[in-house]
Amino acid sequence: EFAAGQRAVRDRERKAAVEKKQEAALKAAEDAAEKERTATEAAEKERAAKESAEKDKVAMVAAEKERSAKESAEKEKATKEAADTEQSVKEAAEREKVAKEAAAVREKGDKDAAEKERSATEAAAKECLL
């Protein structure tokens, strides 16, 4: 009976030791799974952060290109307007020059006509005196 009791005690102790080992193995497996899950979450967050940073970079590059294109278009527009204004000023100066030349020709023509009329009047007056 004593031996049977000791065997029963040893069996219970072995069973308890096996259970403790199983519990320890289960706890180790759970801890490993938790670490893996944590590492996976960290890797996912890092990947998402990299994607976000890449999207931000792409958006910044696109915005810079758009800004540059707008500036270029504005400069081109300003250059064209300046050229148009310069051309308008040149055309106005040319019209003014032509108008002055025409006025000078008209004035000379009027003087010549007045001179001819005066000469004709003087000639007629001389003839009358003769």
Image (spheres, grey):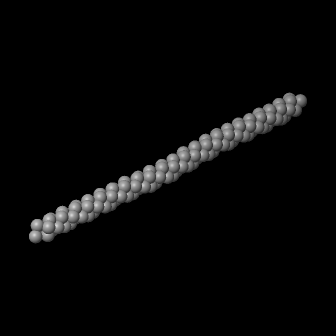
Q: Residue furthest right?
A: 130
Res 6 visible: yes
Res 92 visible: no
- Say if 117 sits above or below 25 in the image: above
- Say if 82 sits above or below 125 in the image: below
Q: How many marks?
A: 0
- Say if 130 sits above or below 1 in the image: above
The image quadrant that residue 75 belongs to is top right
The residue under the point 80% across, 33% down is 115
Residue 129 shown left or right of residue 5 in the figure: right
- Say if 109 sits above or below 31 in the image: above
- Image x and y of residue 124, in percent: 84, 34
- Image x and y of residue 38, in percent: 33, 56
User: In the rendered view of the protein, which quadrant contains the N terminus?
Assistant: bottom left
| Residue nearer the viewer, 40 or 9 | 9
| Residue nearer the viewer, 107 or 114 | 107
- Image x and y of residue 98, in percent: 72, 40
The residue under the point 61% across, 43% down is 79
The residue under the point 14% across, 65% down is 6
The residue under the point 33% across, 58% down is 32
User: In the rendered view of the protein, which quadrant contains the C terminus?
Assistant: top right
Residue 96 shown left or right of residue 51 in the figure: right
The image quadrant that residue 86 belongs to is top right
| Residue nearer the viewer, 15 or 42 | 15
Residue 97 shown left or right of residue 60 in the figure: right
- Image x and y of residue 19, in percent: 22, 64
| Residue nearer the viewer, 100 or 24 | 24
